[in-house]
Amino acid sequence: MSIQAHLNSLAEKRALIKNQIAAESARPMPDFALITNLKKQNLSLKQEMQHYLMLLNEKKYNTSS
């Protein structure tokens, strides 16, 4: 799997988690433990995406030199 394909996969997972957060938050009595867990997952995916973006940028920089 290419780095870009992996980034796309992570972005899709983040979008699903954001939708879950929004849906749970809209409930009359939201489960704040679940929301917290989902937000932690979202942050973890964001950090992983940033890592891969750095790798992708380094790869582009090294090949253009």
Image (tube, rainbow, N blue to C red):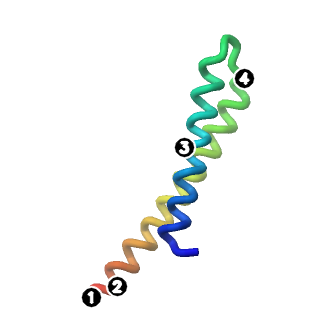
Disc 3 to disc 4, C-alpha distance: 19 Å
Q: Are marks 2 and 3 in contact (CB under 8 Å)?
A: no
In front: mark 2 or mark 3?
Answer: 3
Q: Which residue is mark 3?
A: 15
53 on left or right of 37 = left
Amino acid carrying label 1: it is Ser
Q: Earlier in the sequence, mark 2 or mark 3?
A: 3
56 left or right, relative to 43: left
CB under 8 Å between discs 4 and 1:
no
Mark linked to residue 25:
none
Q: Nearer the viewer, residue 39 or 2?
A: 2
Which is more toward the observer, 45 or 26? Answer: 26
Counting residues from the start of the chain, the first of labels 3 and 4 encountered is 3
Instruction: Say which label, 4 or 1, has the lower sequence index.
Output: 4
Q: Secondary structure at mark 3?
A: helix
Task: Choose top left, top right, bottom left or bottom right for residue 53.
Answer: bottom left
Q: Earlier in the sequence, mark 1 or mark 3?
A: 3
Q: Residue at x 37, y 72 (%)?
A: 57
The label on residue 65 is 1
Residue 54 sits above or below residue 8 on the image = below
- The vertical placement of 12 against 29, above or below, is below
- Residue 31 image label: 4
Q: Position of residue 34 (x, y in %)?
A: 72, 31
Residue behind mark 2: 62
Q: Quadrant of the N terminus?
A: bottom right
Tell me residue 10's x, y (percent): 56, 56
- Alpha carbon distance from label 1 to label 3: 35 Å
Q: With respect to residue 14, does 48 lie above or below?
A: below
Q: Is residue 17 left or right of residue 37?
A: left
Q: Is residue 45 above or below residue 62?
A: above
Q: Quote the CA–CA distance across marks 2 and 3.
A: 31 Å
Label pair 1/2, CB-CB below 8 angstroms: yes
